[in-house]
Amino acid sequence: MKKQTGIWLDLRNAWIINLPAAHDGETIVDHISSEIEESAAVGGTRSKTPWGPQGGDNQRSVEERRHHEEKHYFELILKQVHPDTEELVIFGPSEAKHGLENLFEKQHKAPKIMGVKSADQMTQNQMVAWVREFYGRPAPRKQPGVGREHEE
């Protein structure tokens, strides 16, 4: 069976859901927090003369810094994806998923991207269920009474 992974992300958090190769294996979920500043102060400096013009912080440098923070975040996610992963789905509420998709497409030995989907905020269990459903893999069922000792 193929190694399949799903990544839910926005610009604050990423959850990497690695489905087991075997049906009876354990699903592994990793979490990554981004260090992207959400609202960097954009301001400037005053001139030395009273009531003089105010020089603004270059908007371009703010955007450049944000771009580097996003790239670093995406590279952290890329490093966390298991090297044996063959198929990948990226989903989440923000446009960040497209930036991550672009980074994966530039990689030499990247997994095949099966989809980039929009999804709302989810709990960890909902994310795992979403990835399982995407790949058509039912959740493992525990047999009643297995692992329990019978009391008499």
Image (cartoon, grey):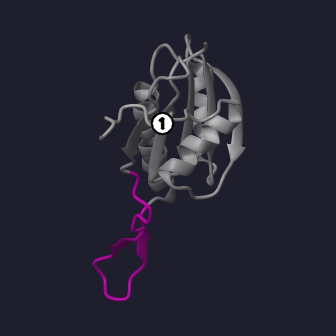
Element at label 1 = strand
Q: Total of numbered circles in the picture?
A: 1
State whether residue 54 appears in this view. yes
- Residue denoted by label 1: 16
**On the image, which quarter does residue 69 sit in?**
top left
Q: Residue furthest front?
A: 152
Q: Is residue 56 above or below residue 107?
A: below
Q: Is 45 part of what is drawn in magenta?
A: yes
**On the image, which quarter does residue 86 sit in?**
top right
Q: Residue furthest bottom?
A: 51
Amino acid beneath label 1: Ile
Q: Is 22 part of what is drawn in magenta?
A: no
Task: Give the overall secondary structure of the magenta segment.
Answer: loop
Q: Position of residue 126 (x, y in %)?
A: 57, 50
Q: Position of residue 105 (x, y in %)?
A: 63, 22
- Boundaries of the magenta span: 36-57
From the viewer's side, name the closer residue of 92 and 65: 92
Q: Would residue 151 appear left or right of 57 to someone viewing this image? A: left
State whether residue 90 appears in this view. no
Residue at image position (67%, 25%) is 113
From the viewer's side, name the closer residue of 90 and 44: 90
Task: Quadrant for the N terminus, please.
Answer: top right
Task: Quadrant for the C terminus, please.
Answer: top left
Q: Is residue 13 above or below residue 145?
A: below
From the viewer's side, name the closer residue of 113 and 62: 113
Residue at image position (42%, 48%) is 65
Residue at image position (54%, 41%) is 128
Q: Position of residue 76 (x, y in %)?
A: 40, 33
Q: Position of residue 37 (x, y in %)?
A: 39, 58
Q: Would residue 53 appear left or right of 60 to someone viewing this image? A: left
